Amino acid sequence: MQNEQVEEGRRDFIYLATGAVAAAGVASVTWPLVAQMGKAADTRAAGSIEIDLAGIAEGSQLKMLWRGKPVFVRHRTPEEIAEAENADVSRYPDPQTDTERLVPTPSGEVNPKYLVMIGVCTHFGCVPVGEQGDYGGWYCPCHGSHYDTSGRIRKGPAPTNLAIPPYEYISDTVIRVG
Amino acid sequence: MSGHASTYEPKYAAGRWLDKRLPIVRMGADFMTYPSPRNLNYWYTFGGILTLCLVAQIITGVILAMHYVPHIDYAFESVQRIRRDVPFGWLLQPMHAVGASMFFFAVYIHMFRGLYYGSYKAPREMIWILGCMIYLVMMATAFLGYTLPWGQMSFWGATVITGFFGAVPVVGESLQQWLLGGFSVNNATLNRFFALHYLLPFVIAAFVGLHVWALHHAGQNNPVGIEPKTKKDTLSFHPYYTVKDGFAVVLFLLIFAFFIFYQPDALGHSDNYIQADPLKTPTHIVPEWYFLPFYAILRAVPDKLMGILLMLGAIAVLFVLPWLDTSRVRSMRFRPVARMFFFIFIFACFILGLCGAKSPDDMAFTVGERVVNGESRLIGLNFVWLSRIGTFLYFSYFLILPILGLIEKPTERPDSITKSVLGDKHPKPAVSG
Amino acid sequence: MMLRLVKNKVAPAAALVGMIAGGLTISHAAGSYDFDYEMKYPHWHFEGPFGTYDRAAMQRGYQIYREVCAACHGLEHVSFRHLGDKGGPYYDENYPDPNSNPYVKAFAADWLIQDIDSETGDTIERQGTPADKFPPIYPNDAAAAGSNGGAIPPDLSVMVSARGGGADYLYNLLIAYDEPKPEKMVISPGTYFNPVMDGGAIAMAAPLIDDIVEYADGTPATVDQMAADVTEFLAWTADPKMEARKNTGLMTMIYLTILAVLMWFSYRRVWRNVEH
């Protein structure tokens, strides 16, 4: 009797082990099938771009494609800068000061003239239109998000400010994005 | 597949031989002689119409795939080539594009019919749930297909919809990039969308098989919602309903043909004649008309994730509908109060559809105008708020149904299908049982 | 908000306000200028279920495209041979194959096509043949933008389909340049006022002036005439199979109607003994 019970337990273990090993096999075959949909090496390798800021006239915006997304570089007017800097950000949906949204130049200070952002609405990825909306910054035509002159979300469904891409000043007038 | 006693008798030896080994002819014969309630009206012909739609979409789709090039540099051009140079491409391409709209038009009528006559109620829950699955896969297929012509709406629609996945907490961005195969909608996206657009119709076909199986197992519902009791209550599917469905199909084809030949672009958006441009968002992104109500629900909520959840909820709630409706009476013919709410629900769907097509900040209607700081401003109800009202009405239907089933007093119902058909014109002895 | 409303004597709306609570919002009435321009809706020869393209108008329209529009705008989806296709501007029954249509050959030869010399591999320019597509005006988008102050002249192949207003939009856009500009509106350099354009400012200078071309058929080349003609031509480039489609459509509708009637009688016959 007891032998049979031991036998029974051993059989259960064998079944369990077989099932577990089979499941592990299925999982390891499934993984490549799922992972293949991720970014391919060539897509991932999308390089960085250099942008010469000197060529952008005051009050105009440069739009560059970086990793398939538009990057905005805006040469802001003094009024726009003043508006961006004097804002009371504490009540904004995504509080950030204007300086926090800029990157220091080689001299260690920020240059508020040039605002560099990813031109993709943080709501559903449309490209906002410049110099529009209730706050004189950007306006997303898709679902009506309004951004101010620092690219901060002020009104509408977008949850966060327009993103700042990773970039650095390689000279006083040239930046490298990525 | 059929839930009735088979009456098929092979006439020849070959038939008997096959019947013993693979009773496929028997299956077909049983299907054709399936006893259907005798009182099915024209709203019940949409099942047949939808079968036609699916078959037509698959055939035209496979043909278009022979000429279409799923590459961002050639996709738009290849569609133009189909319309200009491929023999009969000018006919087949609009057939497929218009066909998608007609498919949804028919499916919406089919679903509203199911809602009205309580076709989702026991013992037909599985028919309804499988139908909801079909609808879900249809939406995915249509969305993927709309990306393929690579026009502006294709691109931006894909960008917006895949953006939904980016709203998932924590893993959102990775998930979105996994779906896209890149940082944004790109060639890899177009390629996989094409592959999946080709695959999903066959998944739909499989679900349709299950849907019809479940239908024949539980039996068809009918406008009075009373189960057939005697043979008198039913008719053989063929020829009675084949001919009725056939007539309805031809009428449907007349509408279909009108759009293909005379208004091929009316159901699409003119922006899709502009090749996709990742740097230029159209001033007003709108999905295809059949998604507009859900799009309006999405935009009714100021929070991104909540908007998506509410939109998914609007579809998910359909799946549990059989358990929300507590009424013992199926057909709304005998439920005057529920019927009223049903029409409000339809109204809400139309209102939401309208809101989805309009710019959210535009005014639905105005009640006046006034000057603020020297600027003229309109006072009224804008589309965001109208869509909120619509969303409220949409969901309230599903909240009211459980209560209504308990408190509503249904009107008097006939004893049987036959009685409901013949009424008092030809009084007949009451059917037993 | 309700208080303000009452002050502004829109009290009848108060009931509505009560119902929809915060639903009442105030928005800008004017984000853009209201232009006085009244759209003109000429009768197009291709309108309606039996409409066909007006050959003479299309031919004049092609001349406008060639001599005016083609300075900046491409026609990338159209080939020269399409001009001689059935339903096209230069279709000739004697030349069912458009590649041998002498008009088509002559028009094609009128254009220079970039090609590769098969012997040397050098880039060469040669005369067009009917099988060629209309060549791009600019080698790439950057060149197009550079030559036009940043605005890329859009391709015209499907322009009529690509604008909500269709042919009417295009026609009105071409004739509306002379409309008076609202006083307050500022037009930035490099753009021109056009009330039909979304926003009122367009990067394209008025392309048509009276008698800018001399029509071969002697039709007076007024702006209005030229705008209508080029619109007719571009309506065809956008939808070259329209005539075939409408013909087939008529046959299909007649066939389906007959089938519907027969189906109805079959239905009545099958159901004749069944009350329902």
Image: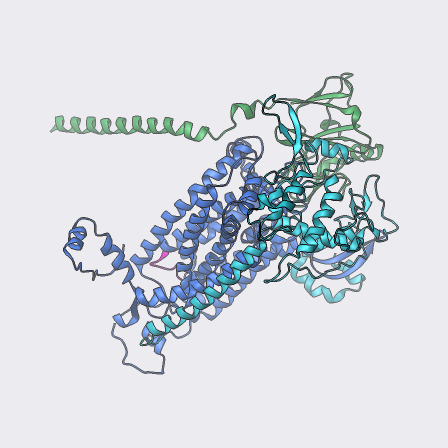
Chain colours: A green, B blue, C cyan
Magenta stretch encompasses residue B205: no
Where in the figure is residue B109, as x and y percent of width and height?
Answer: 47, 60
- On screen, residue C18 above or below C94: below
The quadrant holding residue A154 is top right
Q: Can residue C17 be seen in this view?
A: yes
Q: Nearer the viewer, residue C22 or A154?
A: A154
The quadrant holding residue B407 is bottom left
Where in the figure is residue B55, as x and y percent of width and height?
Answer: 41, 52
Q: Which of C46 and A153 is in front in this view?
A: C46
- On screen, residue A149 above or below A103: below
User: Residue at coordinates 64% horizontally, 60% vertically from top-left?
Assistant: C47
Q: In which quarter of the image is the C terminus of chain B?
A: bottom left
User: Residue at coordinates 76% horizontally, 19% vertically from top-left?
Assistant: A105
Q: In which quarter of the image is the N terminus of chain B?
A: bottom left
The region drawn magenta spans B119-125
Task: Give the farthest residue toward the right.
Answer: C183
Q: Nearer the viewer, residue B351 or B320?
A: B351
User: Residue at coordinates 76% horizontally, 65% vertically from top-left?
Assistant: C11
Total numbered circles: 0
Where in the figure is residue B156, as x and y percent of width and height?
Answer: 60, 41
Where in the figure is residue B166, as x and y percent of width and height?
Answer: 56, 36
B323 displayed left or right of C225: left
Type of secondary structure dominating the magenta stretch:
loop
- On screen, residue C251 above or below B307: below
Q: Is residue A111 visible?
A: no
